[in-house]
């Protein structure tokens, strides 16, 4: 017969694995453990992610670095050990999505040494610092994922010419000179 301590440990482990909330435990921004919901959210099997840096789940090295600096700065001054933000993350398929991240450090003196994170997809693309229409926000999510105006039009059921008009407005509002600059500005908007 199993002792009560071992039984409790097994129940906690089971609860973590079957939790509907995508959760990951990290050590110095490397993945130590994750649950099934996290696997589903990012499209990776557990075995592929264990030991990997969180960088594998970001659209770019710059995003990984920016989010890391911002969260570390916050955690060094947080009295409750918690950090939360919204950011772009990347699915195994390459699709970029907007996610809410909530982290809690178990090592306040060295915040990244051991953390627990919970991620959830956000329905809205982002909360822009510029005034974008709902349609511009919708189109920007597809632009970030590399779709052409024709592909976006087919996907959301509007003319590709209408998409081009919205894309032009996005470029003007975000002061972008080309597509690459537009994508980078959409990604860094918070």
Image: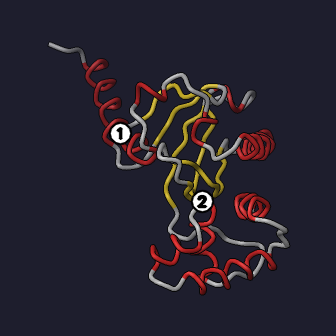
Disc 1 is placed on an element classified as helix
- Residue at left 42%, top 43%? 43
Q: Are marks 2 and 1 in contact (CB under 8 Å)?
A: no
**Horizontal side, residue 118 vs residue 185: left or right:** left
Locate residue 150, reporting x and y percent: 54, 74
Task: Say whether residue 17 is visible.
Answer: yes
Q: Quadrant of residue 113?
A: top right
Disc 2 is placed on an element classified as loop
| Residue 146: image tag | 2
* Screen quadrant of the C terminus: bottom right
User: Where 168 falls versus 147 (above or below)?
Assistant: below
User: Where 78 falls versus 186 (above or below)?
Assistant: above
76 or 65: nearer the viewer: 65
Locate residue 129, reporting x and y percent: 77, 73
- Residue at left 23%, top 15%? 3
Label 2: how many Cα within 10 Å (few below 14, some 14–19, many 20+): some
Q: Which residue is mark 1?
A: 36
Task: Say whether residue 78 is visible.
Answer: no
Locate residue 118, reporting x and y percent: 51, 46
Disc 2/disc 1 C-alpha distance (Å): 28 Å
**Horizontal side, residue 129 vs residue 49: left or right:** right
* Screen quadrant of the N terminus: top left
Residue furthest to the left in view is: 1
């Amino acid at each position: 017969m199993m002792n009560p301590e071992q039984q409790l440990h097994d129940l906690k482990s089971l609860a973590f694995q079957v939790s509907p909330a995508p959760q990951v435990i990290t050590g110095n921004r490397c993945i130590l453990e994750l649950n099934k919901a996290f696997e589903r959210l990012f499209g990776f099997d557990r075995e592929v992610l264990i030991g990997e840096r969180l960088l594998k789940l970001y659209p770019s090295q710059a995003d990984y670095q920016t989010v890391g600096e911002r969260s570390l700065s916050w955690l060094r001054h947080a009295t409750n050990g918690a950090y939360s933000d919204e950011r772009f993350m990347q699915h195994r398929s390459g699709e970029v999505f907007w996610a809410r991240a909530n982290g809690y450090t178990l090592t306040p003196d060295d915040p990244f040494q051991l953390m627990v994170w919970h991620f959830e997809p956000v329905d809205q693309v982002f909360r822009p610092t510029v005034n974008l229409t709902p349609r511009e926000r919708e189109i920007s999510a597809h632009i970030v994922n590399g779709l052409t105006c024709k592909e976006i039009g087919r996907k959301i059921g509007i003319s590709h010419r209408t998409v081009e008009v919205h894309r032009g407005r996005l470029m003007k509002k975000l002061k972008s000179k080309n597509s690459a600059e537009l994508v980078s500005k959409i990604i860094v908007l918070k």
